[in-house]
Image (cartoon, rainbow, N blue to C red):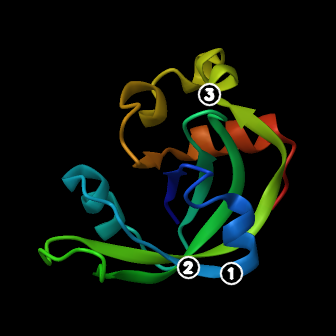
Amino acid sequence: MAYWLIKSEPGAWSWEDHLKKGVEPWHGVRNYQAANNMKAMKIGDRAFFYHSVQEKQIVGIVEVCRLYYPDHTDATGRFGMVDFKAVKAVEKPVTLADIKATPALQDMALVKQSRLSVCPVTDKEWKTILKMSGTKL
């Protein structure tokens, strides 16, 4: 299993929105590196759901339930999407400030490539953030 982090502006699509839907396509990604990350995802991979912009914090966990397929919102046909199902909210949100203050997370893609909307997360980073959030899976 691989781990990821996906970002969303809560005003456009929030964790609460995702919880209500249960399963939802992750569409609208127009960055090639983020798209390549989605192409690398496998069924059962998990991702942190991150509220960007004002909040800047990890708020939930989702799981890949449909592999990369064409994004119906992309008129060019270049980009695709994956479907994520909501797994659970984290017990305590983990802020970007908390992540930046944690030595074990200094090389995290979220820190190094702050504009990337779909990023890989290492096993060590995943476990560290779960511990910080008090979340058990």
Type of amino acid at the residue the image marks with label 3: Leu
Residue at (40, 69) in percent of width and height: 41
Q: How far, Cα to Cα, is label 3 from label 2?
A: 25 Å
The image quadrant of residue 47 is: bottom right
Percent across and percent down for residue 28 are 35, 65
> How many marks are shown on the rendered structure?
3
Residue at (29, 69) in percent of width and height: 39
Percent across and percent down for residue 11 are 60, 52
Q: Is residue 34 above or below residue 109?
A: below
Percent across and percent down for residue 49 are 62, 54
Q: Which mark is residue 21?
A: 1
Q: Mark 1 against mark 3, which lies toward the viewer?
A: 1
Q: On the image, numbered disc 2 is attached to which residue?
A: 24
Q: On the image, numbered disc 3 is attached to which residue?
A: 96
Q: Is residue 124 above or below residue 14?
A: above
Q: Is residue 32 above or below residue 121?
A: below
Q: Quadrant of the C terminus?
A: bottom right
Along the polypeptide, which appears first: circle 3 or circle 2?
Answer: 2
Residue at (56, 40) in percent of width and height: 52
Residue at (36, 74) in percent of width and height: 81
Q: Is residue 38 left or right of residue 17?
A: left
10 Å crowding of disc 3: few (<14), some (14-19), many (20+) = some
Type of amino acid at the residue the image marks with label 1: Lys
The image quadrant of residue 30 is: bottom left
- Circles 1 and 3, Cβ within 8 Å, touching? The answer is no
